[in-house]
């Protein structure tokens, strides 16, 4: 594959929590399609040493840009899913029984403290929670717009919720100072 394939790339995103694989969306000419081209995807290893296509991709997008595209893609997918669930719940009359005040009770607070400080989750669930938390935070404008690469790197590399929120506190402090 030559470097010209980069010109057809529309986005690249991580497709796994370990950030070892990247899905690349690109366009190709297709005379049989009404618009004359179609979108296609392929997956590459996120490893500069073993996949030259990843090296080429890094010429177009930085690690932070790929991470941000991942967050945006996942946020859009989550939003679409929530809209579908909301529509189904509303249609079936389930939505009327949900009370937000019920969520902020002693059980909710106890669970939050357990997740944040107790670390009582199985490793796979803890990793998923950490990944989803980072996704949510990278969706925030203040994180996306942050120019301090050191803080964003700390946030991206955090291995615990405490480290994540410590990095966020540092980011908030940098914004407010």
Image (cartoon, helix red, strand yellow):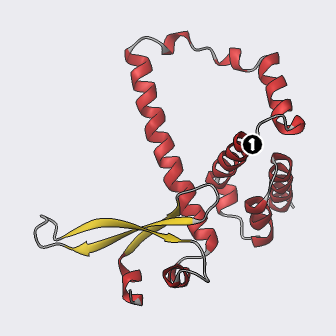
Above or below, 132 relative to 23? above
Query: Which residue: 16% across, 71% down?
Result: 36
Of residues 82 and 43, the one drawn nearer to the viewer in this rendering: 43
Circle 1 is placed at which residue position?
A: 126
The residue at the point 64 percent across, 47 percent down is 136
Across and down, in percent, residue 52 comes to 52, 85
Q: Residue at horizontal 66%, vertical 63%?
A: 145
Quadrant housing the C terminus = bottom right
The residue sitting at 80% across, 70% down in the picture is 150
- Image quadrant assignment for residue 102: top right
Q: Position of residue 3 (x, y in %)?
A: 42, 89
| On-image quarter of the N terminus | bottom left
Please state if 2 lies on the left or on the right of 112 as rendered. Answer: left
84 or 174, which lies in front?
Answer: 84
At label 1, counting other C-alpha atoms closer than 10 Å, the crowd grade (few under 14, some 14-19, many 20 or more) is some
Q: Is residue 32 above or below residue 84?
A: below
Q: x, y (%) of residue 89?
A: 44, 19
Q: Quadrant of residue 138?
A: bottom right
């Amino acid at each position: 594959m030559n470097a010209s394939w980069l010109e057809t790339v529309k986005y690249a995103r991580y497709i796994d929590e370990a950030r070892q694989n990247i899905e690349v969306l690109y366009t190709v000419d297709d005379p049989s399609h009404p618009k004359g081209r179609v979108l296609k995807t392929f997956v590459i290893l996120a490893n500069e040493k073993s996949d030259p296509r990843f090296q080429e991709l890094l010429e177009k997008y930085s690690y932070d840009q790929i991470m941000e595209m991942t967050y945006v893609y996942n946020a859009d997918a989550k939003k679409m899913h929530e809209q579908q669930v909301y529509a189904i719940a509303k249609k079936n009359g389930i939505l009327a029984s949900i009370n937000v005040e019920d969520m902020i009770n002693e059980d909710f607070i106890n669970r939050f403290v357990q997740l944040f400080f107790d670390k009582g989750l199985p490793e796979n669930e803890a990793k998923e929670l950490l990944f989803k938390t980072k996704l949510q935070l990278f969706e925030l404008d203040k994180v996306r717009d942050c120019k301090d690469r050191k803080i964003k790197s700390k946030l991206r590399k955090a291995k615990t919720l405490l480290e994540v929120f410590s990095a966020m506190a540092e980011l908030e402090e940098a914004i407010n100072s």
